């Protein structure tokens, strides 16, 4: 049996829909339950639903053989994982954003609120801009509105959260989308079922391309 860790939240529905198209489906009844570990309809796969940042942890430790998680999370994680496929789901961007009209370039050191301290440090570090990173775990857009920070580094998908809070994109840092990740040992020891899963998902992705 293969265990697949799925990031709960923004990409969960798209991830399950993609996997179902690849022949790994969960019944509606199971999905309606609050169980955090479920078997697929064939009994060959087990899904575990965890917080996005915990997907690399479960997969690196081999508790899950595979995982579906955003590139944004992987950029922050130091886990050593194989990343064979861009699943092209939950596409979004990691951006620097600030209150409309604020001129960050005219400021000295910046206070940056974010859930992405590594990405933030690398981005501003490469430009030689000194930053104080204020790490938050959610609702990051509030920080510049309430004066906790000068700007934020955060995910933007539709842009609605920024707009509704009077913020604008200052700079796009990088793009993100859902990725398939695989534990290195599982890739060797369970090579047949892992290859079968990767092939099935690749087939669905190729089909969508046409
Ligand atoms: C993310 C991100 C933004 C929002 C962007 O938050 O941090 O707040 O989605 O989406 P939009 O551009 O479509 O408005 P998430 O929903 O992951 O929750 P969080 O506030 O707990 O970080």
Image: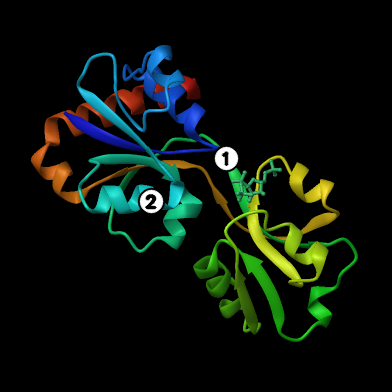
Quarter of the image where one finds residue 63? top left
**What crowding class fits label 1: few (fewer than 14 Cα within 10 Å), some (14-19), or many (20 or more)?**
some
- x%, y% of residue 208? 48, 21
Above or below, 182 relative to 152: above
Q: Which of these two is toward me, 192 or 112?
A: 112
Identify the image quadrant of residue 128. bottom right
- Residue at mark 1: C-beta within 8 A of ligand 1: no
How far apart are the alpha carbons under marks 1 and 2?
20 Å
Considering only vertical position in the picture, is 152 above or below 34? Answer: below
Residue lying farthest left? Answer: 189
Instruction: Determine whether 108 is above or below 31 in the image.
Output: below
Whether label 2 lies within 8 Å of ligand 1 gets the answer: no
Q: Is residue 175 left or right of residue 140?
A: left
Q: Where is residue 204 in the image (x, y as percent from the top left)?
A: 39, 22
Q: Is residue 154 left or right of residue 23?
A: right
Q: Give the residue at x 17% y 43%.
A: 187
Q: Residues within 10 Å of mark 2 (few under 14, many from 20)?
A: some
**Residue under the image location 51 percent in, 36 percent down:** 11
Which residue appears at 26% of the width and 28% of the height?
46
In the rendered image, residue 23, in percent from the top left (x then y), is placed at 32, 16
- Which badge, 1 or 2, is on the more N-terminal residue? 2
Say which of marks 1 and 2 sits in front: 2
Say which quadrant the N terminus sits in.
top left
Toward the right, the furthest residue is 101
**Disc number for residue 54:** 2
Q: Where is residue 158 in the image (x, y as percent from the top left)?
A: 71, 40
| Residue at image mark 1 | 91
For residue 150, above or below residue 201: below
Label 2 near label 1: C-beta < 8 Å?
no
> Circle 1 sits in a helix, a strand or a loop, which is it?
loop
């Amino acid at each position: 049996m293969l265990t697949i860790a799925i990031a709960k939240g923004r990409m969960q529905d798209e991830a399950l829909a993609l996997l179902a198209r690849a022949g790994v489906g969960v019944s509606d009844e199971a999905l309606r339950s609050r169980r955090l570990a479920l078997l697929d309809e064939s009994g060959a796969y087990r899904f575990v639903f965890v917080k996005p940042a915990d997907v690399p942890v479960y997969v690196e430790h081999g508790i899950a053989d595979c995982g579906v998680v955003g590139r944004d999370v992987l950029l922050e994680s130091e886990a050593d994982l194989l990343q064979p496929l861009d699943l092209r789901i939950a596409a979004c961007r990691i951006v620097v954003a600030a209150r409309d009209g604020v001129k960050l370039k005219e400021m000295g050191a910046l206070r940056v609120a974010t859930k992405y301290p590594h990405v933030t440090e690398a981005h501003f570090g490469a430009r030689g801009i000194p930053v104080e990173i204020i790490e938050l775990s959610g609702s990051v857009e509030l920080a510049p509105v309430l004066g906790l920070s000068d700007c934020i580094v955060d995910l933007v998908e539709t842009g609605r959260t920024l707009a509704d809070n009077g913020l604008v994109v200052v700079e796009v840092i990088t793009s993100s989308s859902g990725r398939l990740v695989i534990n290195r040992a599982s890739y060797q020891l369970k090579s047949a079922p892992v290859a079968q899963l990767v092939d099935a998902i690749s087939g669905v992705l190729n089909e969508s391309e046409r």
